[in-house]
């Protein structure tokens, strides 16, 4: 993922490896390194372990989307997944919304318990575990999907009217966290339209099924930041932010870090 912004002193390239998760292993399903170069001389300035940086900037994007798209009064923040991305989303979402509980699910009981212990140390909101992904989808007002699942995590009809979904995992053409039903029910926003229709299975598969068309994507997040009025949310609308990550965001973050050294 190479990127450069005109005016920055750096050029960044993020290299990411993705592999199926082995639930018996403690190793992450993705690993990333960001290489930072001087934009004038080409000299290498830094190598940044990308996993934490990626988790923080992804959660920040989801928090922005939540602030713009979610209802102002919510009760439950639901998280499906227990990795770094999932953990980073809790404090990020709490920056923009108050909740009465965080509800989490993953297939591993041990991972769920570790998530509760880790997240509870840093927030005052109760963190509870669910017995299924369906339970989280049904009870959540804001829902975060942060897995590498190759198949939908739950039935799309389960998500209640008025909910907001941040789907940030499973960004390969062959994988998806959401089914076609949920996509069709959603007011859909993405980080990049071109990237979404070319690489996100959550969107590519319904497009190939002809269940949706490209026009189903209502806006990019950047467009909403410039003009939130592009989308007028109804109380019973389900809003949905699908993101796979943009190299330009890593470039800005990396430049910020290097400039402080």
Image (cartoon, helix red, strand yellow):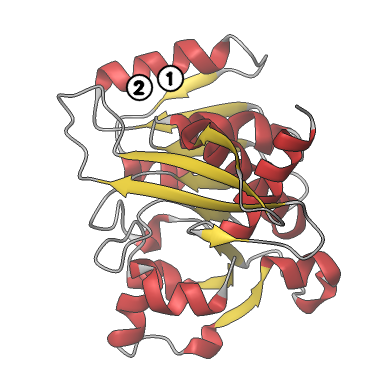
Q: Is residue 182 above or below residue 143?
A: below
Of residue 49 and residue 173, the one placed in the foreground of this image is 49
Which type of secondary structure does the marked residue at label 2 adopt? helix
Q: Residue at label 1?
A: 115
Looking at the image, which residue is at 56% across and 31% down?
A: 88
Would residue 1 be found to the left or right of residue 100 on screen? left
Question: Mark 2 and 1 residues: CB-CB less than 8 Å, in contact?
Answer: yes
Looking at the image, which residue is at 59% across and 44% down?
A: 36
Of residue 213 and residue 78, the one placed in the foreground of this image is 213
Q: Residue at label 2?
A: 112
Tell me the quadrant of the picture where the C terminus can be found: top right
Would residue 204 be found to the left or right of residue 9 on screen? left
Would residue 244 be found to the left or right of residue 82 on screen? right
Label 1 environment density (alpha carbons within 10 Å; few <14, some 14–19, many ≥20) = many
Looking at the image, which residue is at 33% across and 90% down?
A: 210
Residue 162: quarter of image? bottom right
Looking at the image, which residue is at 85% across and 72% down?
A: 227
Residue 144: x percent and y percent? 50, 45
Q: Is residue 150 above or below residue 45?
A: below
The residues bearing labels 2 and 1 have C-alpha atoms spaced at a distance of 5 Å
């Amino acid at each position: 993922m190479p990127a450069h912004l005109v005016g920055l002193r750096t050029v960044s390239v993020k290299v990411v490896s993705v592999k199926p998760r082995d639930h018996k292993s403690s190793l992450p399903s993705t690993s990333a390194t960001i290489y930072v170069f001087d934009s004038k001389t080409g000299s290498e300035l830094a190598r940044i372990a990308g996993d934490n940086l990626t988790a923080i900037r992804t959660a920040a994007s989801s928090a922005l989307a939540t602030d713009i798209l979610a209802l102002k009064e919510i009760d439950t923040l639901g998280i499906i997944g227990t990795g770094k991305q999932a953990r980073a989303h809790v404090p990020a979402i709490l920056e923009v919304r108050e909740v009465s509980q965080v509800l989490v699910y993953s297939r591993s009981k041990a991972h769920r318990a570790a998530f509760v212990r880790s997240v509870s140390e840093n927030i005052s909101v109760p963190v509870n575990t669910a017995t299924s992904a369906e339970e989280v989808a049904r009870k959540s007002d804001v829902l975060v999907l942060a897995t590498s699942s190759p198949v939908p995590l739950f039935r799309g009809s389960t998500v209640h009217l008025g909910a907001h979904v941040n789907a940030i995992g499973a960004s390969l053409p062959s994988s998806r966290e959401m089914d076609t039903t949920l996509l069709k029910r959603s007011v859909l926003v993405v980080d990049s339209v071109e990237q979404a229709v070319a690489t996100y299975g959550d969107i590519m598969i319904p497009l190939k099924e002809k269940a949706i068309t490209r026009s189903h994507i209502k806006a990019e997040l950047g467009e909403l930041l410039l003009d939130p009025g592009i989308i007028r949310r109804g109380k019973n609308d389900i809003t949905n932010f699908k993101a796979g990550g943009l190299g330009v965001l890593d470039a800005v973050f990396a430049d910020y870090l290097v400039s402080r050294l």
